[in-house]
Every structure is written in structure tokens, then in C-alpha cells.
Amino acid sequence: MDKETLEIIKAIQEKRKKELDTDISIYENFNAMYFFDNARLRKIIESTDGAKINFKLQDIEFIIERLDKTIFKFETIGTQYLEIQDECLVDDFTEYCYLYSSYVSTIVDIYRYLEQNYQIQNNNLREKIFGDDGLGEHNIIHQVIRNSSLHGKLYKPSWSIHYTFEPHTKKITIILSKDSILTNRNCNQKGKIYLERYSDDIDIIEIFKSYLEKVKMLFEIYKKIVYQQYENELSIYQQYENQLNELHQKIKNSLENRAVK
């Protein structure tokens, strides 16, 4: 095929693109855009409310998985430290403490985005599920550890090793200084009341685990509320995704059949 013919074909394709009807709720329009302007089709789908809400919920699910893995890393590093007493591992405690609080901050931002843009009717769900203890944990993790790290103060956990009555058995606890939290200006009343249960050092993994349980519980209920409130928008988005997958599969099958012949 010569260059002139290719230019003519390209011009026809560009003209066809401009003439496409962007109302992809009509099946024929959806199919036409899929074959003539696939990138534009994907942008239109991703601009729908259903897509935006779905992506935000997926982000929260991803972060919850990361929080679980961060706690696992904390415990793994603690076990390693018991075995080899490598001081370099202490820096890993600081890294994962920062990472956990950063993930929490991101979840807060996602919920704030959903509340501001979609007015999710949750009736103070967070306060009901977290209670005073959970709000105290949130203050320590988000306002104290995270916000302080953004302004030049990294919280560096240390450790405490306990020997049990069983022979050759010991346990490590990753800790933060209670005083260092209490004297932070971001520690509010709920955070201070929560800290009263600790005589001196704070078991940071205990707080992270307790907080994550509440985060998971909140998300499961919140997700159901969102699905109910935006059932139509999420259903339309899922329909578009199903149509995309259907067309992808048809093309794949067609190419495989040609290869066989």
C-alpha cells in the first residue's frame, strides 16, 4: 500500500472519529467508539461518577491490604532483630511507622473526597464505629505521627525485649515513648485519654492492629452505603466494563481463529 493511499485512509479514520456520537449509553455508539477511538472511549467511561467512586473504593481496599502488610513487616523485622540483634533493623521500624501513618492519611483524604463530591449519607459512621478509643488511636497515628513527620519530626520506635518463664523464650515489643506523644501539640484530648492506659511506653503494633480492625469494619459498612446510594451510577459503570471485556474477548477469539487457519 503506497503512502498516498495510507494518507487517505488516515484522513477517513480521523473524519470518522470526529463524527462519533459520544453518547455511549447507546450500544452502537459504544461499539463504534471502541473501534475508532478507544482511548477516548476509556476517558469517557472513567469520567463517569460510577467509575470515579469505584476507583476510590478500590484505592481504599488497596491501602487496607498495605496496612496489613505493614504490620506483618513490623512483626517480621522484630523477629529478625531477636535473632541477629542488627541495629540497622531499627531504621526499618521508623520506615514502617512512617509508611503506616502515610497510608492512614491517604485513606482520610479519600473519604474526604467522597464526602465532599458525593455527599455520602453515613450519619457519623466513623464516630460510631471507632468510639473514643479508635478516635484516640487515629489522633496518635494521623495527627501526631503523620503530621509531625511532614514538618520535620520523625517518630523513631525503639524496642523492649521480654523474657518469659519458658526456657529460651523471649518476645520483642516495638514501642514509642508516651511522653513524646503527649508533649506533641497535635495530641488532642482523645489521644491523651487513650494514652492513660499505658504507664510509660506505647506498644505501637498493638495500636496499629486495633486501629486497622476498625478501619476494616468502617469500610465494609461504608461500601454498602455507597452501593445503595449510587447503585444506578455503579451499575452503569459495570455495564460499560462488561461491554469492554466482551469486545476484547471477541477480538481475541477472532485473532486466535485466524492464527489457527
Image: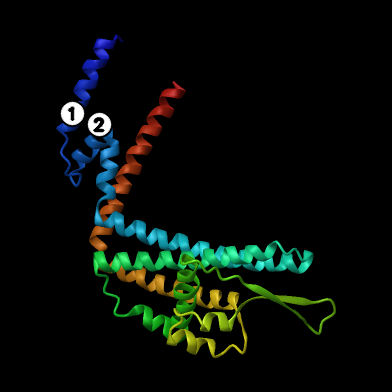
- The secondary element bearing badge 1 is classed as helix
The residue wearing badge 2 is 36
- Identify the mark at residue 93; answer none if there is no mark: none
The residue wearing badge 1 is 16
Q: Position of residue 205 (x, y in %)?
A: 59, 74
Occupied quadrant, residue 138: bottom left
Q: Residue at x 16, y 32 (%)?
A: 18
Which of the two residues, 79 or 219, is positioned nearer the viewer here? Answer: 79
Identity, as a three-letter code, of the amino acid under mark 1: Arg
> Crowdedness of circle 2 by 10 Å Cα count: few (<14), some, many (20+)?
some
> Crowdedness of circle 1 by 10 Å Cα count: few (<14), some, many (20+)?
some
Q: Position of residue 22 (x, y in %)?
A: 17, 41
Of labels 2 and 1, earlier in sequence is 1
Q: Does residue 246 appear left or right of residue 89 in this picture?
A: left
Which of the two residues, 240 or 127, is positioned nearer the viewer here? Answer: 127
Identity, as a three-letter code, of the amino acid under mark 2: Phe
Q: Residue at x 45, y 23 (%)?
A: 259
Q: Is residue 133 above or below residue 54?
A: below
Q: Does residue 214 appear left or right of residue 161 in this picture?
A: left
Occupied quadrant, residue 171: bottom right
- The secondary element bearing badge 2 is classed as helix
Q: Is residue 126 above or below residue 23?
A: below
Q: Does the CB distance between marks 2 and 1 fall below 8 Å?
A: yes
Q: Does residue 256 appear left or right of residue 246 in this picture?
A: right
Which of the two residues, 33 or 129, is positioned nearer the viewer here? Answer: 129
